[in-house]
């Protein structure tokens, strides 16, 4: 390979190497859309902590009845006082205030899990890791940063539950070769500096419930669609048998 070709190959490979270096290891989100209790808890967390700034404008409150809640429970526990059960989930924060406080209107969260899935194939895992990756950063306007979304503009609204984390750099060593050589490298780790009102396991469970609800909200009819698809495939399987027998009956004299 000539020198020019080597240089060209290096330039073409550079963007891919840069992307690989920026990749963040995502934690597996322990979600289960069949767990109605988890979905109910996730809905409660969403209403109490997310809907103040973010809308879910493609979702109506009355669809929460599919999670095993009555309209009275929805009305008493999960909606704003001036909202109706049939209304869309819209934030009470005005767009003007949002632009003034955050510099941009917070995104709608109805299909955030599906949107992230289309980008990196792991929307639930991204959200689960993101909501557990906030740490104190005095250099940021909000005082917070995130390991998954660097220079994030969103403050850590769940900090009182999780506590305050800091990002620390540790130097680790690994042996190299047979001559006792050691290679040192830096690793960044999140360390809980000030505990919150929840233990780490409790907070992880709360985030998992919230992510479970966000995944459900992106496609509320998924459970019904999957169940219907199974019945359709069974029906087609039975029909195939009858169609095959009918074909043999029509063509028996030809063969």
Image (spheres, helix red, strand yellow):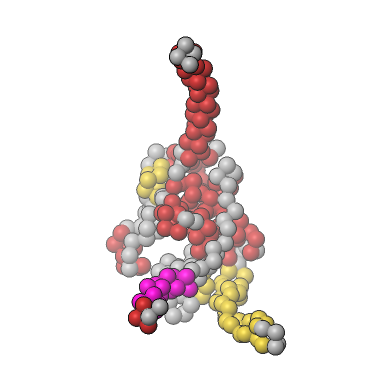
Q: Residue furthest left?
A: 96
Residue 102 appears in the rendering: yes
Picture coordinates of residue 126, whole percent (x, y): 50, 60
Q: Residue furthest top?
A: 253
Tell me which secondary structure the magenta stretch mostly adopts. helix
Which of the 4 image quarters holds residue 85?
A: top left
Residue 246 appears in the rendering: no
Instruction: Write the residue at 40% across / 44% down.
Output: 59
Q: Is residue 249 left or right of residue 171?
A: left
Instruction: Write the residue at 47% across / 55% down.
Output: 121
Comparing 169 with 242, the one in front is: 242
Instruction: Write the residue at 61% across / 85% down.
Output: 184
Which of the 4 image quarters holds residue 175?
A: bottom right
Answer above or below: position of 204 versus 1.
above
Picture coordinates of residue 38, whole percent (x, y): 58, 47
Instruction: Write the residue at 49% across / 49% down.
Output: 215
Does the magenta portion include 10? yes
Locate the N terminus and report the quarter of the image it occupies: bottom left
Picture coordinates of residue 131, whole percent (x, y): 51, 62
Does the magenta portion include 15? yes
Picture coordinates of residue 125, whole percent (x, y): 53, 58
Which of the 4 image quarters holds residue 102?
A: bottom left
Answer above or below: position of 25 versus 244.
below
Q: Residue furthest front?
A: 255
Answer above or below: position of 244 versus 193.
above
Q: Which residues are magenta?
A: 6-22
């Amino acid at each position: 390979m000539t020198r020019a070709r080597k240089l060209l190959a290096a330039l073409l490979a550079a963007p891919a190497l840069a992307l690989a270096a920026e990749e963040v290891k995502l934690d597996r989100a322990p979600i289960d859309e069949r767990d109605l209790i988890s979905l109910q808890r996730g809905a409660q967390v969403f209403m109490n902590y997310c809907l103040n700034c973010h809308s879910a404008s493609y979702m109506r409150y009355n669809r929460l009845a599919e999670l095993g809640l009555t309209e009275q429970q929805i009305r008493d526990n999960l909606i704003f006082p001036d909202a109706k059960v049939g209304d869309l989930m819209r934030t009470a924060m005005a767009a003007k205030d949002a632009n003034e406080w955050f510099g941009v209107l917070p995104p709608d969260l109805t299909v955030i899990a599906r949107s992230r899935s289309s980008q990196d194939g792991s929307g639930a895992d991204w959200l689960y890791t993101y909501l557990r990756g906030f740490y104190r950063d005095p250099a940021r306007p909000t005082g917070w940063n995130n390991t998954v979304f660097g220079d994030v503009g969103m403050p850590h609204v769940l900090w009182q539950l999780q506590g305050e984390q800091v990002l620390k750099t540790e130097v680790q060593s690994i042996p190299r070769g047979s001559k006792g050589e050691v290679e040192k490298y830096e690793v960044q780790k999140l360390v809980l500096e000030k505990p919150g009102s929840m233990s780490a396991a409790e907070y992880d469970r709360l985030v998992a419930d919230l992510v479970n609800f966000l995944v459900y909200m992106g496609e509320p009819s998924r459970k019904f669609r999957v169940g219907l698809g199974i019945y359709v495939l069974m029906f087609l399987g039975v029909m195939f048998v009858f169609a095959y027998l009918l074909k043999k009956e029509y063509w028996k004299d030809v063969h």
